[in-house]
């Protein structure tokens, strides 16, 4: 039997969909020997690997619907657009990570981080996970919208600046087949970063010019990664799970009712395809 992998992209609060998919996986016993997540996708995967359904909804919906999550409050208290610290603390308070189950689960988990010191992606596995949350906070630290996180003297942020879809990482780790959970609806095309964004990145990261360069070609990398997934799908080596409808959800949506329905859509979309998923994994 081939080694199967599960990969999850980010998407801000759109990751509520991913959390719903993962709850369905837990309910129907869908397991993987390897998982990889980027940004909010990595945050959701923590609860999947620790097998905590309650933490999935807290992570995907409850934590993002607070005034502390996005906007003026985190700007005033964390000097960032997204309140990474308050969000992580909220999740830990409401549904603390079962670290014992997390560590003992044979399912591997890797989270992609962008090393600002050298402009490279580094993947942190379970053995490198820190209970202070620094690794997952770094994974969710969006370029120019949040502060970077220092780990062992190095500055890190969201690996989605380069690896938005960690498909190549999964292949390099020995996965012959992958299930990809996307937060993007059909026909989504990532737009090129605006000139003002690139120029701002050049100013903020004057000593790290590769940051602005990576931002300027991010849309091209995203398309390459999607092309890779599509080619694998044609070969019968990838299965894509994505929203079956457009509900008007963006990466900044904080309405609890809307995100709750988005989460439920992830669950129901997956439930309808559960036999297809099992067949794909067991073939």
Image (spheres, rainbow, N blue to C red):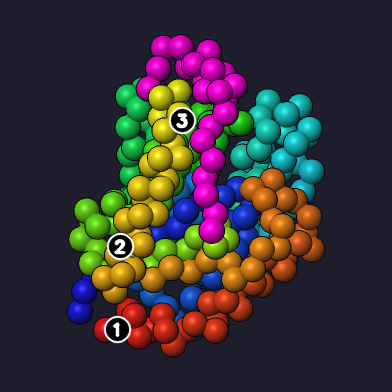
Q: Mark 3 — residue?
A: 215
Q: Mark 2 — residue?
A: 231
Name which residue lies at 44% across and 87% down. Answer: 275
> How far is mark 1 from mark 2, CA to CA?
20 Å
The answer to whether mark 1 and mark 2 are in CB contact below 8 A is no
Which SS class for mark 3? helix
Taking depth in this image into account, of 100 and 72 the one nearest to the observer is 72
Which SS class for mark 1? helix
Which SS class for mark 2? helix
Q: Earlier in the sequence, mark 2 or mark 3?
A: 3
Name which residue lies at 60% across and 48% down. Answer: 12
Please, is residue 100 above or below residue 30 in the view?
Answer: above
> How far is mark 2 from mark 3, CA to CA?
25 Å
Of labels 3 and 1, the one closer to you = 3
Q: Earlier in the sequence, mark 3 or mark 1?
A: 3
Q: Mark 1 — residue?
A: 282
Q: Locate residue 3 relative to residue 22 in the image: left or right.
A: left
Which image quarter holds the C terminus? bottom left
């Amino acid at each position: 039997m081939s080694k199967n992998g599960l990969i999850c992209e980010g998407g801000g609060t759109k990751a509520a969909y991913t959390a719903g998919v993962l709850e369905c996986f837990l309910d129907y016993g869908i397991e993987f020997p390897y998982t990889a997540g980027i940004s909010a996708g990595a945050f959701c995967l923590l609860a999947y690997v620790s097998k905590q359904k309650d933490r999935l909804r807290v992570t995907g919906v409850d934590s993002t619907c607070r005034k502390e999550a996005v906007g003026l409050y985190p700007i005033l208290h964390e000097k960032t657009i997204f309140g990474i610290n308050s969000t992580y603390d909220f999740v830990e308070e409401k549904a603390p990570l079962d670290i014992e189950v997390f560590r003992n689960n044979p399912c591997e988990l890797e989270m992609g981080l962008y090393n600002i010191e050298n402009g490279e992606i580094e993947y942190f596995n379970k053995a490198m996970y820190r209970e202070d949350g620094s690794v997952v906070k770094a994974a969710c630290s969006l370029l120019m919208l949040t502060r970077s996180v220092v780990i062992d003297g190095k500055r890190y942020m969201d690996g989605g600046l380069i690896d938005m879809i960690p498909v190549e990482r999964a292949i390099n780790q020995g996965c012959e087949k992958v299930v990809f959970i996307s937060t993007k609806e059909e026909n989504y095309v990532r737009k090129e970063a605006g000139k003002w964004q690139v120029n701002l990145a050049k100013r903020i990261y004057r000593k790290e010019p590769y940051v602005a360069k990576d931002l300027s070609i991010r849309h091209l990398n995203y398309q390459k990664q999607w092309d890779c997934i599509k080619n694998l799908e044609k070969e019968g080596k990838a299965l894509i799970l994505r929203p079956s409808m457009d509900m008007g959800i963006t990466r900044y949506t904080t309405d609890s009712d809307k995100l709750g329905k988005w989460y439920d859509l992830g669950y129901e979309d997956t439930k309808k395809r559960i036999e297809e998923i099992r067949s794909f994994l067991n073939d």
